[in-house]
């Protein structure tokens, strides 16, 4: 009788250990979740930095004309009255001398 009880207890222990190591919520899943959290934190940090840069750009655009002027020049190709616009075109890479 004692052997049967010991055998049942050992089987239960083995089953619980198998569930701990291999089953749902086991070690492998926990490690995968930790890696996922690590990647998500890195992505969140990158997005926070991007948001901060965009926020600073919005504030700059709201507070002064220099940023608006810079944007008009670079994105829209605008120039001030009296200025002369020059476009410099680089030769294609194949036409450059060796």
Image: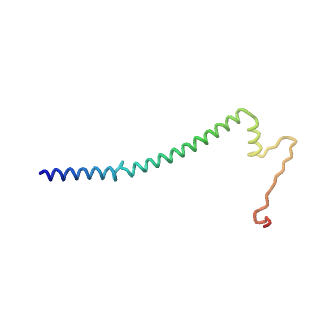
Q: Where in the figure is residue 17, as x and y percent of width and height? A: 29, 51
Compared across the picture, whether 42 is left or right of 2 comes to: right
Can you name the residue that lies furthest to the left here?
1
Task: Pinpoint residue 91: horizontal percent, then vertical percent.
Answer: 79, 61
Viewed as shown, does residue 73 lie left or right of 19?
right
Q: Is residue 58 left or right of residue 69?
A: left
Q: Against 11, is 46 above or below? A: above
Q: Residue at x 79, y 44 (%)?
A: 78
User: In this view, which residue lies farthest toward the bottom?
Assistant: 98
Drawn side of residue 6 relative to residue 34, left or right: left
Residue sitting nearer the eye, 88 or 7 = 7
Residue 23 horizontal/vertical position (percent): 33, 51
Residue at the image position 26 percent from the left and 53 percent from the top: 14
Foreground residue among 89 and 32: 32
Q: Position of residue 40 (x, y in %)?
A: 50, 46
Q: Nearer the viewer, residue 72 or 45?
A: 45
Report the residue at 58% width, 43% height from top.
Answer: 47
| In the image, farthest residue toward the top | 63
């Amino acid at each position: 009788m004692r052997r049967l009880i010991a055998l049942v207890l050992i089987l239960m222990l083995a089953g619980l250990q198998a569930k701990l190591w291999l089953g749902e919520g086991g070690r492998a899943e926990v490690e995968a979740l930790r890696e996922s959290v690590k990647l998500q934190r890195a992505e969140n940090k990158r997005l926070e930095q991007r948001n901060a840069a965009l926020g600073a750009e919005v504030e700059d655009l709201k507070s002064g004309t220099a940023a608006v002027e810079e944007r008009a020049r670079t994105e829209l190709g605008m120039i001030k009255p009296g200025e002369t616009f020059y476009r410099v075109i680089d030769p294609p890479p194949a036409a450059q001398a060796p």
